Amino acid sequence: MAEPTPVVAVRGGGQGNSARRRARAAQVLFLAPAVVYIVLFFGYPAVKNMTMSVQDYTTRAFITGEAPWIGLDNYADVVSSSIFSKAVLNTVLFTAGSIVGQFVIGMLLALFFRRRFPLNAVMRSLLLLPWLVPLIVSGTVWRWILDQDGGVLNQTLRGLGLVEANPGWLTSPSLALVAVVVVNIWIGIPFNTTILYGGLQEIPKEVHEAAALDGAGRWREFWAITWPLLRPVVTVALVLGVVYTLKVIDIILALTDGGPANASQTIATQSYQLSFQQFQFGQGAALSNLLIVVSLVFAGIYLWLNRRAVDE
Amino acid sequence: MKTRRAWRDTAVGILLLAVMLFPLYWIVNVSLQRGASAAGTDWFPTDPDLSGYRTALREQGGHLVTSLLIGVGSALFSVLVAAPAAYVLAQFRSRWITAVLFAVLISQMVPGIVVANALYTAYEDLGLLDSVPGLILADSTAGIPFAILVIRAFMMGLPRAVVEAARIDGAGHFRTFVSVVLPMSVNAVVTAALFAFLFAWGDFLFALTLTTTGQVHPVTLGLYQYIGSYVADWSTVMATAVLSSIPAVLLLAVAQRYVAAGATAGAVK
């Protein structure tokens, strides 16, 4: 990620001001479409979300064109709702569970793929498939795999005599969140493996050879050498993982729709349901603003850690 | 000795891969079994049957075309917006340019539901709900920041001498970009376009929130509606899932080595 940056000096000096001004004008023109897009499709929504969250923004607002200012009522409604604390807890559990699972398995796979063996490269690219297929496709197949009566998981567990009654992976309030986390781990493994494998490849081979000569065992070698050298990549993988996991909606909607009885409802899915199923756009906006705040904290960490790559 | 260990690793790898890819195998397997339903599914499609695909194409064919239009549109639009910006972000330095780069990084972190929430009301006013252009624009929220970062990462590695030489020859900035920088960056641009296509093709949230009448109906929405009610015929659902996964498989087959590079350079989704 952090490659050496060739900086092409803007021709100045002898050529005087007009060349520099032309260069500046060209830069502005080249950046303009991207900047306009970012302002309209990220800046505007962020600001609009703020204003909606302090307005009584319901379907009536679309008809009358008026959304009266109601201060912090939306926030009060959202926070005092019985679902809120559940959604917060679920979001924390969903994010933490997903990240830990994806990261640990991704790291083990990355370490495994460091070895040289036939078909290594082919397998690594095939491993990317779960990450590339549409999320709704993954959600669909897992829904059938985990289906209480017809799903292949229960079919197998029953065949092996491991369960008597079929567990309702997606329909029982005590299992739904676990199931959703497992599926999200499955989706996140390829990304973690790829990014960590890339990081591992950057570590010079000689370092490991030296460690082997010193007689360090694999376990010690990992913690004493690999892990410290890999830390920048690890941080990026973890922080990005958190930011992306916080906003997951597709998978949960496809698997459980947040249910049963809100057992797998997160802040993101609850915000979707408030806005687009109950048409309480103001409340939905208030809730998703909380999501933005949390994301921004992590985004700040990410940028701070990445500052060298940006500044150079 | 050494080769034996290597082959043992290969065997372990195949096993791991089999576990990881099992759900994808299951999609194909179920799609080929007639009327797969609650009775339980065979492990192998011993008596393959294509009726699931026939139904899927009949019911979802139009939706696949819609998704294709949106995907191609978003890929072109993303690259068109991203490539010039990436060039400036890679080759020049100033406080403003750094600020734009920050904005790009931050934009990747804005939750889709926030964008959907605000765009719904704006689209309602602008008449962009239930329209292909509306979805192309919204879906590019994934494609554009990603494309900027991927193309920029590549352009930072361009030999500076070549770019400078073009300019000293008297080529303007626009010509240097079009006839020198872009041809040298084809790989990065293609990678970015393929990913932007894939993001738009797989988009579900905007399809769900920015359509109301069903006039414009991407295939992801078709799948969601299948599983939203009791599913009597899983083979049709899975056949649709297979058809929806074709672009991902093609991308991996055609652009294998760029995919991993793209994942590390921009990393969204």
Image (cartoon, helix red, strand yellow):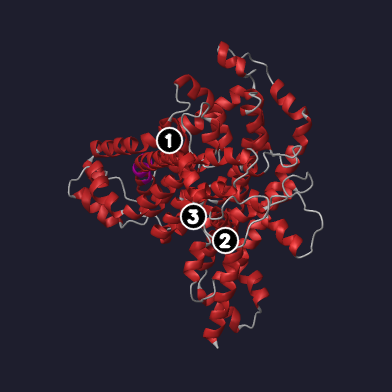
Amino acid under label 3?
Ala
Mark closest to the chain's N terminus, 3 or 2: 2
Viewer-nearest of discs 3 and 1: 1
Amino acid under label 2?
Leu
Q: Where is residue B112 in the image (x, y as percent from the top left)?
A: 56, 37
| Chain for disc number 2 | B
Q: Where is residue A262 in the image (x, y as percent from the top left)?
A: 74, 37
* Secondary structure of the residue carrying numbered label 3: helix
Residue at the spot 54% in from the left edge and 64% down from the top edge = A197
Q: Name the residue under label 3.
A: B263
Taking the image as shown, residue A141 lies to the left or right of residue A42, namely: right
**Label 2 close to label 1 by CB (< 8 Å):** no
Q: Majority secondary structure of the magenta segment?
A: helix
| Chain for disc number 3 | B
| Chain for disc number 1 | B
Q: Looking at the rendered structure, which numbered label has been put on residue B19?
A: none
Q: Name the residue under label 1.
A: B136
Mark closest to the chain's N terminus, 2 or 1: 2
Magenta region, residue range: B81-86
Label 2, label 1: how far apart the Cα atoms are:
31 Å
Q: Is residue B210 a member of the stretch shown in magenta?
A: no
Q: Looking at the rendered structure, which numbered label has been put on residue B21?
A: 2
Taking the image as shown, residue A96 lies to the left or right of residue B166, namely: right
Residue located farthest toward the bottom when viewing the structure as drawn? B1
Q: Nearer the viewer, residue A111 or B170?
A: A111
* Secondary structure of the residue carrying numbered label 2: helix
